[in-house]
Image (spheres, rainbow, N blue to C red):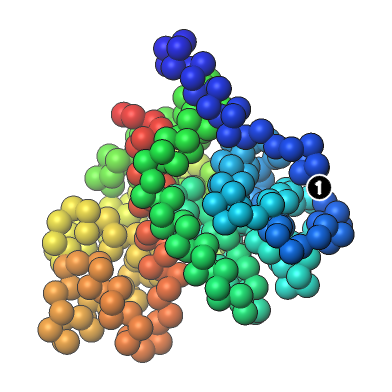
Amino acid sequence: MKRHHLISALVLAAALLVIPVSSRHITLKDAVETPRDSSVVCVIALDGQPSGSRKIEVNRAMLRQYAKTMNYDAIISVVKKGENPLDSLRDGKADIVVRYFADSLDSTGLAQSRVFHDSTVWVIQDGNLDRLKEINGWIMTMSENEMFTKMRRSILQGITISDTRISPYDSLVKIYAPKMGWDWRLLSSLIYHESRFNPEARSSRDAAGLMQVRTDKISIDSLMDPVINLEFGAQYVARLQEMYSKTAADSLETIKFVLAAFNAGESRINDCITYASKHGVDPGYWDNIVELIPEIPNFKGNQTIAYVTVVLQTWSDYRELFPD
């Protein structure tokens, strides 16, 4: 980046991220004691992100802009170890909790917004439908706002001028992505949403490693090796690519079906395709399947629909921030 562009980006980022002293280092206990008539109490709960990281600062900026637009005073804190912000949300001690979309959510008494481009959602109390509509409307407007997009990008780039990679596994990803017929940033996006680039991640369903692979061919411990994990994961995605390229209308639609199958399992997605065909709907387009999913027995597909959307959104972000 040229020097004058770098300076401009940093100045813009600094201007957007100035936080009043009264709003810094606030805890959930502090938030409870704050008058709530014209304020919105927000908690950023992004596991693994230290306070001051680029992801935290982007979300802090979004919350501040939302509050400014809606004429609220924003009271923003970052969750501390041992705190459960969702309980505070249920108890009325917080108004909005920012979380990763991919994190599991006990939805009792809670509702979440549409997904932001940085793969986060805003969680609020289920009964506050007016605020949910307000938030979703604001997110939609901001997602289409060129100035806001530039602001967000400037913050990301300004904070990470020396950061030239998506993850420590870029070199490996660039080896295995072509074997799948994928852009390396798309594979990085999938890995991000599966494991947050944690090679030792493991799910309750015995999915393990970077791509959260499940196989009975080798041990779980072996899947913690990034090379082995990417090898098995790439083989599986390549097989899905070949399978769905016969149904999907084009290469992008193929990717959507592959992501859906990676998330929900190929048998469920195949059932969806069969259902669409039987009902006279063109099964080559993922959006057509999305419209039918509420009718399909034994498949609550909302999580899969959102997964496809958010992985593609992250892919788009990666392509902007890390040009090939």
Q: Please tell me how many numbered marks the rendered image carries.
A: 1
Instruction: Spot the residue most to the top.
Output: 3
Local SS, label 1: loop
Amino acid at the residue labelled 1: Ile
| Residue beneath the point at 73% across and 51% down | 75
Residue 40 location, quadrant = bottom right
Q: Quadrant of the N terminus?
A: top left
Q: Percent from the top left, x then y, of residue 274?
A: 21, 81
**Front residue of 202 and 146:** 146
Task: Say few, some or many: other residues with alpha carbon within 10 Å of mark 1 (under 14 / 14 to 19 / 20 or more).
Answer: some
| Residue beneath the point at 28% across and 77% down | 291
Answer yes or no: is residue 103 visible.
Answer: yes
In this rendering, the answer to whether 279 lies above or below 234 is: below
Q: Is residue 199 left or right of residue 73?
A: left
Can you identify the residue that label 1 sits on?
26
Q: Is residue 175 left or right of residue 158?
A: left
Q: Percent from the top left, x then y, of residue 205?
A: 56, 68
| Residue beneath the point at 41% across and 68% down | 304
